[in-house]
């Protein structure tokens, strides 16, 4: 009995291909129309499209520059400074927001009434208040209202808070520090490898993995030993009405980092809470029946399963943090968008600078998405 052939106009595979081809044709047609309009308008105004202007001297200063910079440097270096300023806010902001968000998210499910209510107030207040308003609060009502250098707020004799920002301990860049940092990175990599090996032994052969645990502890201890005793630190000190040593976070950088992190942490907290609640109640009961303490129940049983639900929405929150960092221009922090706006005003090349900003943010977001997608695949259940 021969199988009846499906007509091509009813074949779902062919219909999908035709649909995708039509969508691509529409997209490229729209892009072609936009490019044609752009070229015609440039010709009508007597302008030329190009990026040759980026080699001219910038002729403006930049605060908070992580690399040496002067107004005589070209626009390309000014853009690089803005990019580095944005990247450091994104990197440290994601770390701080994730840490706070996990703590608040777990606190939302606490059996302690006071802790649970405080976490709820934190989440509901920050999520329902505009981020720009929160940045203004931290900048004008907090950091600019701090005392002057003559009478700083001192925390543990190593952190100074003034209206010039935050002065924190920082390490000295030399051979000793460099070798110690390399050793720390190697130790962390080995610790991750041994930890995965220990988990494999437990799952495959039922071994407790005590040897691997001790080895893991030794590596972590070695890393901390090098971190504390093998790195030369610069500690901030108050001398003659001036703070020397350490690293200074300007009020603008501190405002953006703290405000953005605390705001995003409120959304991450809800993701964590929802992820934990998605785990079947029987998992909690089984873990408690085995005699595990509440902390171990969260760490070993609940959180690994919740990650499968948490990572996709966490990706969206990290992307939002990266894009929201462009609000730095409102408080005078020289990030990529702020510097690009200055260059656009000076040169009149708004189209070119808009493309630079769009492509840069798109690239950053694609990198974050690819990293999170890889992490998401690693925590999914592996079918045998």
Image: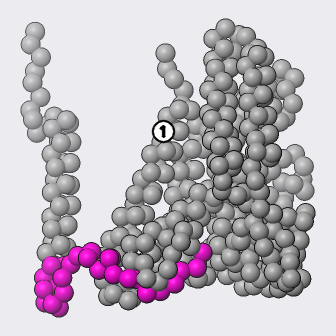
Q: Is the residue 228 above or below the residue 42 in the image? A: above
Residue shown at the point (10%, 39%) measured from the top left: 9
| Residue 169 percent location from the top left of the image | 77, 62
> Residue 195 placed where, x, y %?
67, 26
Scheme by which the image is coloured: one colour
Query: Which of the 4 quarters of the picture holds residue 164?
Result: bottom right
Q: In this view, does 205 lie to the left or right of 330?
A: right
Q: What element carries label 1?
A: helix
Q: Nearer the viewer, residue 278 or 364?
A: 364
Q: Residue drawn 49% across and 70% down?
A: 81
Quarter holding the N terminus is top left
* Relative to 39, residue 345 above or below: below
Q: Position of residue 283 (x, y in %)?
A: 73, 28
Q: Which residue is drawn at 67% across and 81% down?
A: 136
Residue on which the image places disc 1: 374
Q: Is residue 332 magenta?
A: no
Picture residue at 33% right of the left edge, 87% below the top: 347
Q: Which of the 4 quarters of the picture holds residue 321? A: bottom right
The answer to whether residue 342 is visible is: no
Q: Is residue 222 above or below residue 233?
A: above
Instruction: Determine the image quadrant of residue 46.
Output: bottom left
* 231, 248: nearer the viewer: 231
Q: Position of residue 180 (x, y in %)?
A: 69, 43
Q: Is residue 194 left or right of residue 86?
A: right
Q: Alpha-carbon neighbours of circle 1 within 10 Å: few (<14), some, or many (≥20)?
A: few
Q: Count the numbered circles shown.
A: 1
- Side (left or right) of 92 relative to 28: right
Q: Residue at the front extreme?
A: 175
Mark yes or no: residue 224 visible. yes
Query: The magenta stretch spans which residues?
Result: 37-64
Residue at the bottom extreme of this rendering: 45
Indicate yes or no whether the magenta region holds residue 59. yes
């Amino acid at each position: 009995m021969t199988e009846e052939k499906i007509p091509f106009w009813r074949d779902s595979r062919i219909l999908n291909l035709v649909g995708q081809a039509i969508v691509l044709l529409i997209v490229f047609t729209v892009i072609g129309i936009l490019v044609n309009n752009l070229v015609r308008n440039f010709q009508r105004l007597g302008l030329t499209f190009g990026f040759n202007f980026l080699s001219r001297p910038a002729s403006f200063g930049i605060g908070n520059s992580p690399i040496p910079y002067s107004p005589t440097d070209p626009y390309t270096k000014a853009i690089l400074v803005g990019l580095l300023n944005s990247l450091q806010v994104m990197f440290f902001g994601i770390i701080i927001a994730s840490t706070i968000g996990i703590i608040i998210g777990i606190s939302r499910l606490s059996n302690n009434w006071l802790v649970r209510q405080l976490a709820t107030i934190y989440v509901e207040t920050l999520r329902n208040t505009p981020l720009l308003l929160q940045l203004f609060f931290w900048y004008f009502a907090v950091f600019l209202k701090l005392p002057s250098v003559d009478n700083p707020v001192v925390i543990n004799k190593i952190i100074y808070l003034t209206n010039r920002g935050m002065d924190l301990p920082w390490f000295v860049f030399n051979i000793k520090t460099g070798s110690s940092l390399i050793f720390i990175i190697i130790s962390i990599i080995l610790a991750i490898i041994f930890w995965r090996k220990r988990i494999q032994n437990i799952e495959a052969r039922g071994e407790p993995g005590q040897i691997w645990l001790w080895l893991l502890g030794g590596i972590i201890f070695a890393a901390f030993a090098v971190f504390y005793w093998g790195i030369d630190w610069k500690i901030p000190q108050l001398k003659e009405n001036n703070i020397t040593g350490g690293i200074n976070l300007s009020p603008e950088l501190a405002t953006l980092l703290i405000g953005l992190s605390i705001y995003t942490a409120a959304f991450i907290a809800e993701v964590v809470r929802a992820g934990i609640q998605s785990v079947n109640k029987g998992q909690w009961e089984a873990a408690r029946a085995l005699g595990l303490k509440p902390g171990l129940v969260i760490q070993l049983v609940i959180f690994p399963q919740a990650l499968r639900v948490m990572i996709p929405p966490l990706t969206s929150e990290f992307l939002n943090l990266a894009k929201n960092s462009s609000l730095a221009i409102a408080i005078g922090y020289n990030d990529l968008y702020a510097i690009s706006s200055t260059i656009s005003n000076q040169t009149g090349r708004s189209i070119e600078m808009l493309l630079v900003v769009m492509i840069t943010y798109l690239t950053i977001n694609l990198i974050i998405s690819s990293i999170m997608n890889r992490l998401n695949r690693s925590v999914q259940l592996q079918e045998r």
